[in-house]
Amino acid sequence: MEMIKAVPAAGARERFAAAAQAHTRSMYRAARTILDSDADAEDAVSEALLRAWQAFSRLKSEEALKGWLLKITVNCAREQRRKGGRVTYTDDLEPLAGSVEDGQYDGLWDAVLALPEDQRTAVVLFYYEDMTLAQIASVLGVAQGTVKSRLCRARGRLQEMLKEEL
């Protein structure tokens, strides 16, 4: 038998809706750094919003809302990745011209997506979401020093990847 979860009061509905609308794009970017497809990232965001709504009444500080939503999203995306997500068989597909696999990057975002998952997530949270090292460490469940080293390694890789474009 499934437990019935506490649903926030009616006044909280509007606050949650506003927060969801304000942070959905950030949540999607965080999920997309972990998952390989847009559809999987959308599924992870949907699951994260459901879980966040169910736990919204337990949120202690509205200042921590963005980080809280991103942490839930990252956890949902990781869980989905462990379960396998969608499977796309590419054996019969022709490679796309200019694909990231050929070492040519159309821009910074393509290069960021080519980074290893741990570095990619740190880069997106730091540069695209303007989160502090402490906030990123909290979202990812790692030490601040780990976040710093992931960012440093990511910068080095990005520099190498984009060097040929300059």
Image (cartoon, helix red, strand yellow):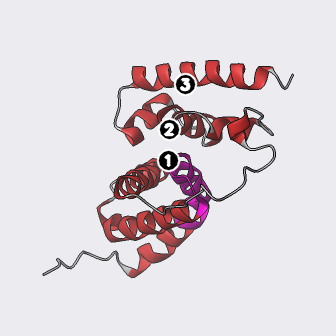
**How many angstroms separate mark 2 from mark 1 (CA)?**
6 Å
Q: Position of residue 53 (x, y in %)?
A: 39, 70
Q: Nearer the viewer, mark 3 or mark 1?
A: 1
Of marks 2 and 1, which one's residue comes earlier in the chain?
A: 1
* Residue occupying the point 35% across, 55% down: 79
- For numbered disc 1, what is the local secondary structure? helix
69 displayed left or right of 101: left
Of marks 2 and 3, which one's residue comes earlier in the chain?
A: 2
Residue bounds of the magenta highlight: 20-38
Q: Is residue 30 magenta?
A: yes
Q: Position of residue 39 (x, y in %)?
A: 57, 65
Q: Which residue is mark 2?
A: 117
On the question of residue 151 being in view, the answer is yes
Nearer-the-camera pick, 156 or 148: 156
Q: What label does residue 151 carry, if any?
A: 3
Q: Is residue 94 magenta?
A: no
Q: Position of residue 13 (x, y in %)?
A: 45, 76
Nearer-the-camera pick, 37 or 103: 103
Dot 3 crowding, Cα within 10 Å, few <14, some 14–19, many 20+: many
- For numbered disc 3, what is the local secondary structure? helix
Dot 1 crowding, Cα within 10 Å, few <14, some 14–19, many 20+: many
| Quadrant hosting residue 94 | bottom right
47 displayed left or right of 22: left
Amino acid identity at mark 2 = Glu
Query: Number of callouts in the render?
Result: 3
Instruction: Give the overall secondary structure of the magenta segment.
Output: helix
| Quadrant hosting residue 99 | top right
Amino acid identity at mark 3 = Leu
Q: Residue furthest front?
A: 92
Pointer 2 with pointer 1, Cβ within 8 A: yes
